[in-house]
Image: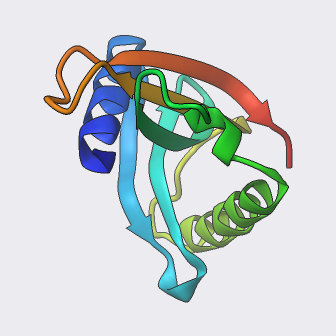
Amino acid sequence: MGAAGEDAALSYLKRKGFRLLERNLRLGRSGELDLVMLDHGTLVFVEVKAMLAGEAIRGLDHIGAFKQRKLIELATIYLQRAAQLRQPIRYDAVRFDAIEVAFPDHTLRQPQVKHLPDAFRA
C-alpha cells in the first residue's frame, strides 16, 4: 500500500506543478525521505501516509513529534549533501508537507489524496 500511496501522492503533486528530485531516498541508517520535490522556488520534503479509508487512526496522525524530528534530521543531511554537489539545487525556502492517501478498499484504486502543505516547521 505504501508504494501505491506514494504513486498517488506523486501524481497529485506533479499535477500541481511540483518537480520530483528524489523518491525513497535512503540516507544511511538515519532513515528515508519519501519524496523530495521543488515547488517553484521551495524545496519540499514530503511525508506520505497511505491507509484504507475509514481506519480509526488517520495517516496524518502518525506524524508526531518523534517523526517530525527524524524528518528534520534527514532533511538536514540531505541539504548538507546537496550543498556539496557540483551543480547544487537552487531553492529559496524549505518546507515540510504531509500527504495522506486513503484507498476505499484493498484494490488500491481511486485514492483520495489530502495534502497538508507546511505540515510542521523545523
Rendered position, 46 above or below 114 = below
* Front residue of this view, candidates 26 and 41: 26
Q: Is residue 63 left or right of residue 13?
A: right
Rendered position, 36 above or below 24 = above
Instruction: Look at 60% across and 40% down and name the residue there.
Output: 43
Residue extending furthest toward the bottom: 29
Horizontal and vertical percent for residue 3? 26, 47
Rendered position, 62 above or below 106 = below
Rendered position, 16 above or below 45 = above
* Front residue of this view, candidates 83 and 109: 109
Q: Quadrant of residue 104?
A: top left
Q: Is residue 29 left or right of residue 8?
A: right
Horizontal and vertical percent for residue 45? 59, 45
The quarter in which the N terminus is drawn is: top left
Horizontal and vertical percent for residue 60? 63, 34
Instruction: Look at 37% across and 29% down and name the residue there.
Output: 9
Q: Quadrant of residue 58?
A: top right
